[in-house]
Image (cartoon, helix red, strand yellow):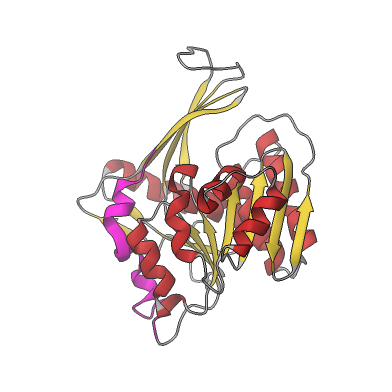
Amino acid sequence: MTAQPDILCIGAVLWDIIGRSASHMERGSDVPGRITRLPGGVAMNIAMAAQRFGMRPALLTAVGRDPEGEELMKACARMGMDMRHAYRSEDLPTDRYMAVEGGNGLIAAIADAHSLEAAGGRILAALRDGTLGSAETPWEGRVALDGNLKTDLLREIALDPAFARADLRIAPASPGKAERLHVFLGHPSAVFYVNLEEAGLLCQTRFADSAEAARALHDRGAARAVVTDGGNAASDAGAHGLVTKRPRAVLVTRVTGAGDTFMAAHMAAEARGAAPEAAMETALTAAADYVSGDTNL
């Protein structure tokens, strides 16, 4: 693979272990269903979706040299993922994510991204040694940044001259990690992709809807804020003003990866020159197709 990437996806590439059941589930439920293991992680999910929408992603991540890591690298290669710049650790195990989804949505999930956190700035080598960029010749394309990175590394990225010209697109990974992204409030090019709960955590309040949340996050220092709210309206606030659109109603068959699909579709639409309203429409359609199972992504 020799083509120059047009987007860098920085963060988690791991094994997704997902248990799904059509049954309504609560604490202690024991129901029939299906358990799958697939390449996943926020950065990986964004890269897969970005590739599907015509972009050329490259992944900056950490993958162990254990058997699970070797298997994961082969799976990524079969999918056409550019893993040339991945940090391969001899002593860190390959990360994993485990989730249970019922007919009533996500029941519980655990993200074990400790190896990514331990690898730290080593995953950014290609952006600092001249391979993809450096402090003197910064990367000028899009960067999808995964909130699974530790706060210290996120703070380092926010100030790093190697990212000075990048179009930063940031996803918190989960509500539990949303507050790590405070370091990008006030950053001149950071675009936040968050859900309603994550926006509330960043602003230390609760919002009635995505429009209120997007405006507040923009007012708080986000150069741009794109806020989703499940099947309710999503909003995009920035220098262009406010765009709010409602997704079409679908039967939800899966949840994990929906936000990453929305983000990738939105970025790809804008890379093709779409205006904010059209990009939002494209992203909502892609997310609806994904959660309804109408795509093989």
Quadrant in the rendering for residue 23? top right
Q: Is residue 150 above or below residue 159?
A: above
Looking at the image, which is closer to me, 205 or 269?
A: 205
Q: Residue 193 at what x, y percent from top left?
A: 59, 55
Quadrant in the rendering for residue 151? bottom left
Q: Residue at x 66, y 47 (%)?
A: 228
Looking at the image, which is closer to me, 54 or 150?
A: 150
Q: Residue at x 78, y 45 (%)?
A: 246
**Is residue 124 magenta-colored?**
yes
Query: Can the viewer see residue 36 in this picture?
Result: yes
User: In the image as oriented, which residue stretches furthest toward the front?
Assistant: 205
User: In the image as oriented, which residue stretches furthest toward the bottom?
Assistant: 136
**Is residue 113 magenta-colored?**
yes
Looking at the image, which is closer to me, 50 or 240?
A: 240
Query: Can the viewer see residue 79 in this picture?
Result: no
User: In the image as oriented, which residue stretches furthest toward the left?
Assistant: 91
Quadrant where the C terminus lies?
Answer: top right
Range shown magenta: 111-135
Looking at the image, which is closer to me, 218 or 105?
A: 218
Q: Is residue 165 above or below residue 136?
A: above
